Image (cartoon, rainbow, N blue to C red):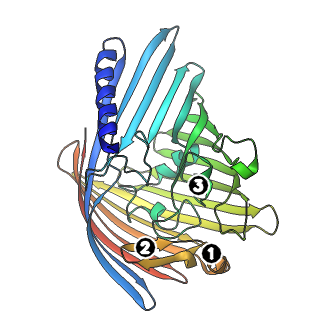
Amino acid sequence: MKITKIAVAVAALVGAASVSAQTANVTVYGGIRVNVEVAQYSQPGNSKRITSVDNVSSRFGFRGSESLGGGLNAFFQLEAGFASDTGAAGASSGVTQIFGRESWVGLNGGFGELKFGYGLTPYDDVLGWAHHQGANSWENRNNGVSGGAAFGKSGMFTNYVNSTSCNSTAFDARYGNSVSYASPNMSGFQVRTQYAFIGEAPTLAAGKCSGWDTAVRYSQGPIRVGLTHARHNDFTGMDAGFGVNDQQATRGYASFDAGVARIGATYEVASYKPVVGGSLKYKYWELGAVVPMGANTFGVQYSQRDKGLGACWGVGANGPTFAVTAACRGNWDNGGGKHLALTHDYALSRRTTVRSYYADLKNETSGKVRAFSVGLWHSF
């Protein structure tokens, strides 16, 4: 019944978009991404190899704008995820909303861009510059040791839509109930800030968590530089004994495109501070390069985190599991991780790519993951 309702709603939106296209600029876009993956998950006394056909952030969406005169425009974006491996709706990082990837309405003009709703954060704008040939599978170091204190694929990305979702340690995220402002591009510089009333509740007991991200980015010629800071207030991303905590992360990124290769580097520091007691901190860094050669693009990326929640990771019946307890949090200083990815793209056309990778992920205390994958990605 739920899928039927979603299908009816999407059909209605498609029809509405077709009618609206007569007076506004509406674009339908998307991507279907499927990988065949073999992953080996290993811990002392516990090992499992899983072969799977996986969806990798498949999505479709609508973008539109209307000129209001005087250089002012109204615009919107709606983006839905779906599972290309099973056909299920709303399959994006575990969300169940129809448009669980982006949902914005706003105004733009000479003053910049102001938008209201739900979507990716300024922190993600900077982190996304370092994505190497893909996202949301093991080749992406964000599914390993980056973007939060977790390890493996669990707890590294969160859609913060209500107070319940604030039970996370992740900084790479989408914010719901939010307001975002982006400045005009000023000779390559742009500033974006986003504040989220995530909990929208009057008391902490009811879940009054909030988030505020700001980023400054410079992109001109061969140079890209980004600096971002994320702050999460009144989150509960650890175990009950740690309690309500404030979370902060500062990330810097720089890259240079020499034509034969683009070389990039990242450094991040993050902390989790409870109402009572001392804070937990980690440091993260990465180096990477992307080399284009005709229809081929090769990439290599190495990243490392010194501390974290690695001891909270385990091997379950279907792969990695993750649950924060006081015992594993007590092993924070030994919870660092290392991630190596080798990637290759072969462009069959401008919109269709064969994508492959090998990834090796290790934790100081709780084992490792090795994965190989080949996939077909098509954009429309």
Q: What secondary structure is found at the residue carrying circle 2?
A: strand
Task: Kindly identify which numbered label has been placed on residue 320.
Answer: 2
Task: Kindly identify which numbered label has been placed on residue 273.
Answer: none
The image quarter containing residue 235 is bottom right
Mark pair 2, 1: CA separation: 16 Å
Q: Which residue is mark 3?
A: 171
Mark pair 3, 2: CA separation: 20 Å
Residues 320 and 258: in front is: 320
Q: Nearer the viewer, mark 2 or mark 1?
A: 1
Q: Is residue 191 visible?
A: no
Tell me which numbered mark, 2 or 1, is placed earlier along the sequence: 2
Mark pair 1, 3: CA separation: 20 Å
Amino acid, disc 1: Thr
Residue at figure coordinates x 33%, y 72% from the top left: 371
Residue at figure coordinates x 54%, y 21% from the top left: 107
Q: Which residue is mark 1?
A: 325
